[in-house]
């Protein structure tokens, strides 16, 4: 997909170094003492494994820079979400490109893909309760909270939200 000099497409293994840099940049400022988010410091091997097993998409600017990314965790895949619908994971924008609305553009593309191509009626996502501004942002985007849960040995409570797509 292309829009105003931006390109949205599924990431390939050749994109792995840029994707790992994006994830580390976007999540590197998370306080790991209160929020457990392994992707913030994942190894190259773990990042490669993620790209090999979880469909991940990227938004590229006119210079070819990977500015934002998003993953889709399917119910039948290795990283299912809390409901039998696709679950958005790792919606992130590289710190060098924040403030341009790239996360919203990336979300709009993935929402269109889920609704129009996959015919999904619902999508879910989760975020840490210590990030209330993200919960508020997702609510502005049409999501509704449906659960809060501490997962395994995580330090934070996950806030689950869903959005009806049809």
Image (cartoon, helix red, strand yellow):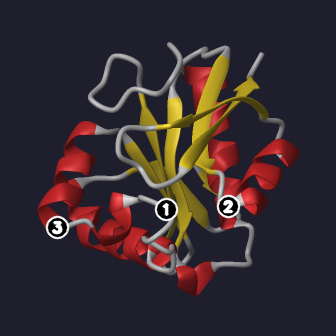
N-terminal of the two: label 1 or label 3?
A: 1
Judge left or right: residue 99 versus residue 11: right
Disc number lying in front (3 or 2): 2
Q: Is residue 106 above or below residue 165?
A: below
N-terminal of the two: label 3 or label 2?
A: 3
Residue drawn at 73 percent across, 75 percent down:
100
Q: Is residue 66 visible?
A: no
Observer-nearest of 42 and 64: 42
Q: Is residue 54 above or below residue 66?
A: above
State the image coordinates of residue 28 (x, y, percent, origin top left).
44, 78
Residue drawn at 51 percent across, 73 percent down:
30
- Whether label 2 touches label 1, CB < 8 Å: yes
The Cα–Cα distance between marks 3 and 2, rounded to whole angstroms, is 26 Å
Identify the residue under disc 2: 131
Crowd band around label 1 with a 10 angstrom C-alpha radius: few (<14), some (14–19), many (20+): some
Observer-nearest of 3 and 101: 101
N-terminal of the two: label 2 or label 1?
A: 1
Q: Is residue 62 visible?
A: yes
Residue drawn at 83 percent across, 36 percent down:
142
Identify the residue under disc 3: 44
Residue furthest bottom as drawn: 96
Identify the residue under disc 1: 35
The Cα–Cα distance between marks 1 and 3, rounded to whole angstroms, is 21 Å
């Amino acid at each position: 997909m292309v829009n105003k000099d931006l390109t949205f497409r599924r990431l390939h293994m050749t994109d792995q170094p840029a994707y790992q840099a994006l994830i580390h940049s976007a999540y590197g400022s998370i306080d790991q003492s209160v929020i457990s988010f392994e992707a913030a410091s994942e190894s190259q091997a773990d990042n490669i494994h993620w790209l090999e097993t979880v469909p991940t998409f990227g938004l590229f600017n006119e210079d070819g820079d990977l500015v934002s990314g998003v993953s889709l965790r399917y119910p039948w895949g290795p990283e299912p979400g809390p409901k039998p619908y696709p679950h958005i994971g790792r919606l992130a924008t590289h710190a060098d490109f924040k403030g341009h609305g790239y996360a919203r553009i990336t979300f709009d593309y993935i929402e269109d893909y889920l609704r129009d191509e996959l015919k999904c009626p619902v999508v879910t996502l989760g975020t840490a309760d210590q990030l209330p501004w993200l919960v508020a942002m997702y609510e502005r985007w049409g999501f509704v909270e449906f659960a809060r849960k501490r997962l395994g040995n995580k330090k934070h409570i996950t806030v689950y939200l869903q959005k009806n797509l049809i």
